[in-house]
Image: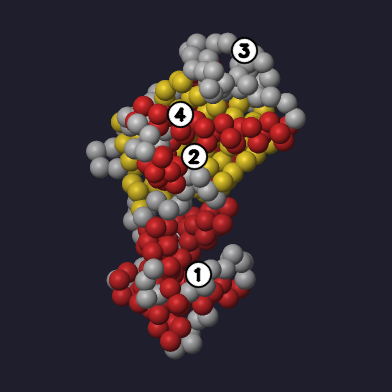
Amino acid sequence: MNNLTHFLSCDWGTSSFRLKLVELAGLRVVAAEQSEEGNAATFEQWQQAKQPPEQRLGFYLNVLRTHAQKLEKQVGRPLAGVPVVISGMASSTVGMLELPYKPFPFAADGSDLTTRLLPATADFDHPVLLISGVKTDDDVMRGEEVQLVGCRFAPTDRPQLFLHPGTHAKHVLVQGGQATALKTYMTGEFFALLSKESILASAVEKNDDFQRPEHARAFERGVQASQTDNLLHNAFLVRTNRLFDKLSAPENFYFLSGLLIGYELSSFPPDFTGPVVLAGEKALVASYEAALRLLGITDKVASVTVKQAAEVTLRGQAAVLERAVAAGQLSAPHPW
């Protein structure tokens, strides 16, 4: 890769910040830093600083530099010149630099995503490759498109489905090497609102042990309920489950999760029989994998392949970086 051996992977979301020093050969993570300095919090800090618009990029790069310096301390040597690849909300209206969305369809290998190269400067001695999101006529995503690229979909005419659980779950149809259709579901955000801000909050208790038999059974009850009655009615069952001692608060947590995930998946295309790639954070992926099985979807599709978010993010960013190097955007070898 034109003497590039490492890059800095930045996954900068709305509420979280992750920076990793990555060895390109094998995508081994050498060092990592993370914080809650997501784009929303950073944007608010920039507004409070009352700086002029032209200083916004520099404000964000200062945050990035602080974490890069922490990585330098971890590895015990300077990282000047190592390129930074940034995906997520950093290219949005609350990010460091707003980039236009790439319209659908887009190449599943990432070859035509919208990017912007920011050359290294005296104040920030890393070239930055900023990746924008994608849009349809009525839907958008930023960050997940890089994870889709990292899934390495086969360039076949058979329809394939990219399923990404999260705050705003994404279902993306891939066919002929192109991502052709997108639907977003606010499943995670609805779960957060109902479990923390609504009358149901006192009836649920967060628990991370999905494998406990009683939790799995409660999740299954939620999935089954999602298919049999109105969601607005079923949501109230979370309250009566506690009032009538039918479920404990941790069990109710999984009942509500199953209810919302099951409702999201009720729109799964009934005639779809191709392969499904399920990519995301470990706990959510496990829940969706169980829901797909409980709804009989696993049995009718060609396969369900599970991938972790961190893995596909690195692969997607590396693919976009390789394209930039091949195109001569990053032609100078870095000294690391």
Q: Which residue is mark 1?
A: 254
| Residue positioned 28% across, 37% down in the render | 136
Q: CA distance from mark 2 to mark 3?
A: 25 Å
| Quarter the N terminus occupies | top right
Q: Nearer the viewer, residue 319 or 158?
A: 319
Q: Earlier in the sequence, mark 2 or mark 4?
A: 2
Horizontal and vertical percent for residue 60?
47, 34
The answer to whether mark 2 and mark 4 are in CB contact below 8 A is no
Q: Quadrant of residue 194?
A: bottom left
Which residue corresponds to mark 2?
12
Spatial CA distance of label 2 from label 4 is 16 Å
Label 4 or label 3, whichever lies nearer to me, is 4
Q: Residue furthest toward the left?
A: 137
In which quadrant of the rendered view does residue 314 lie? top right
Residue nearest the observer in this picture, 335 or 255: 335
Q: Which residue is mark 4?
A: 58
Q: What is the number of the mark on residue 100?
A: none
Does the CB distance between marks 4 and 3 fall below 8 Å? Answer: no
Q: Is residue 116 visible?
A: yes
**Does residue 179 sit above or below 288 in this rendering?**
above
Please identify the quarter of the rendering in which residue 101 is found. Answer: top left
Distance (Cα) linking label 1 and label 2: 29 Å
Q: Amino acid at mark 2?
A: Trp
Label 4 sits on what residue type? Gly
Residue type highlighted by circle 3: Pro
Left or right relative to 86: residue 105 = left
- Of circles 1 and 4, the one toward us is 4
